[in-house]
Structures are given as C-alpha cells and as structure tokens.
Amino acid sequence: MKKLIFILMIFNLSVYGQMLDKSKRWNVLHVMIPIKDCKCAGVFRETHSYSLGKDSIMKGKVYHELFDSVINVNSYGNPTNYSELIGYIAESDKKIYMINRNIYQPNENLLYDFNLSVGDTFKSQYFNHILIKIDSSEYYNKKYRTFHFADSLVWIEGIGSTSGFINNYNYPDTLLCVSENDTLIYKNNLGYDCVIAVNIDNIEEMNNPNDFKIYPNPTSEKIFIESNKIINRINLTDIYGKLIYQCFPEALNYTLSLSSIEKGIYFVRINDHVRKIIKE
C-alpha cells in the first residue's frame, strides 16, 4: 500500500499542473517605495488581484485577457478598488507568455518555462535566473512541483511565482493567495492576509501625537518610547504587516532595540496607536 501511494505521488507530480484557468484569481502584494529625494505621495502597499477574461488568437496561441483589480488607499485614507485590462496571457507547452497592453509596440514576453532542468538559465526581461533545485510543495493537501532559482526566485507549477504572478522584478512583490472557484488553493507562508492595503504616510495622520513620544526617528540602534498612559502592548511589524517583535511592558516608558533587524521602514503599534519608524 505504501509503495502504491508513493507511485501515485510521483505520477501526480509528473503530470503538468496547468496554471491559467478562468476560475482562478491571484492576489499579489505590491509595495511601491519612492526613490531618494523623490517628492512622491509616499510608500504604498496595495493588493493586485489578477483574473482572466475573454480568449483570442494572437501569435498562434490562445491568449486570455488579463485584468488587474487594484485595492489600495488613496490620499484621503479611503479604500479604492478599480480594475483594468493590462494585457494578454497564454499557456502553451508548459510555458506562460504575456503581451503587455500598455506599451507602444507590444512584444510577446516569456514569464515562465516549466520545461527547465536544474542548471538551466531562465532569461527574464531584466535578469538571468539559474535553476538550482526542483522539488515539491504542498498546499491544501495537494503537491505542486516547485522550481528554486539561485537568486531566491521560486516558481510553483500551477500557482505562479512567490514573487508575484506576473513576476514584476522592479518592486518587492509577494504572492499572497491563489483561489480557484473562490476556494483557496494557495496561501503564502509568511503569515500575510490575502488582502493588504495601506498608505504608509497616512498612518501618522490617524494618531494623536500628544499620546506618546518616540525618539530618535530615524534611528540606527534603538528607540525610546514615552507615554502619558500605561503601555500595555507594543507590536513591531514590517511594511508587509509581518510581526517582528511583541512585548507587554505595563509601564510608561520603554526602550525598543532595533539592532537585530535590517534597515528599512517599520511600524510600532503602542496600545491602539501606530507610528512609522525608519531603521538606518
């Protein structure tokens, strides 16, 4: 019996797992960080929810319309949700192709190639990725062939890339969830929800600055917290919402060490108030 189960598992992984299906939806966390000295609106986190539409024949392949529904927070702190046709996507011979609708002379770009073997190099629009391992991952009691590249890029056959469905290498994207017929078939292993949306700059406006003080900010090692009310709880999270540190001081003052975390933007939640801090 064990031998039969093992044979069935090998057989299931040897059968190609089709990725594109109109019943699927891919939710991706997209983080936009302005470059230094840019007078931009600030740092945004927003969820891009991708879905497929009508079919058409293009370049000898069946292409599906690709829609992007964006969930974010506008400059007034109110949630917005809009959808647009961003291009066309096709699946052929274990490869995924995309034609971008928003460029002047649209070219056919290869997004995935699940025919690769260990040692092969995949050439994306901007980078070369060397495949170093192929194994399997399990989500919701189903196994999927998983491709690991030397630069930490990960493809999951039938799901997408953990760095985002259409592999946007210009921004730190994260594949949050994939659903099929409104049922989850994939959820990230980072503890993030399927929808995340916040304008980071608006966080400062939603809190009373007189309730407590945090200094220095930016900082390289630690921050000092002073409050006029008892501090019951402190949460430190990254820009994706992942919990980095938690404590329950039950005091008016607290010193929070940041020496063990990487440089970047973080949030400190003190009781019911939130502050953005920068680790230099």
Image (spheres, rainbow, N blue to C red):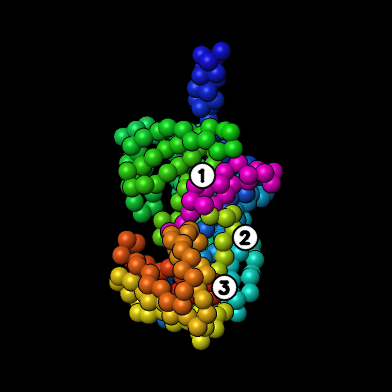
Q: Residue furthest bottom?
A: 210
The residue at the point 33 percent across, 74 percent down is 219
User: In whole angstroms, how far apart are the C-alphas of marks 1 and 3?
Assistant: 37 Å
The residue at the point 34 percent across, 66 percent down is 258
Q: Which residue is mark 1?
A: 160
Q: Position of residue 218 (x, y in %)?
A: 35, 76
Q: Position of residue 154 (x, y in %)?
A: 42, 44
Residue 273's image quarter? bottom right
- Locate the C terminus by quadrant: bottom left
Depth check: give the residue in front, 48 or 208: 208
N-terminal label among 2 and 3:
2
What kind of residue is marked 2?
A: Ser
Q: Which residue is mark 2?
A: 69
Magenta residues, start to end: 172-191
Depth check: give the residue in front, 150 or 249: 249
What kind of residue is marked 3?
A: Asp
Q: Which residue is mark 3?
A: 272
Classify mark 2: helix, strand or loop: strand
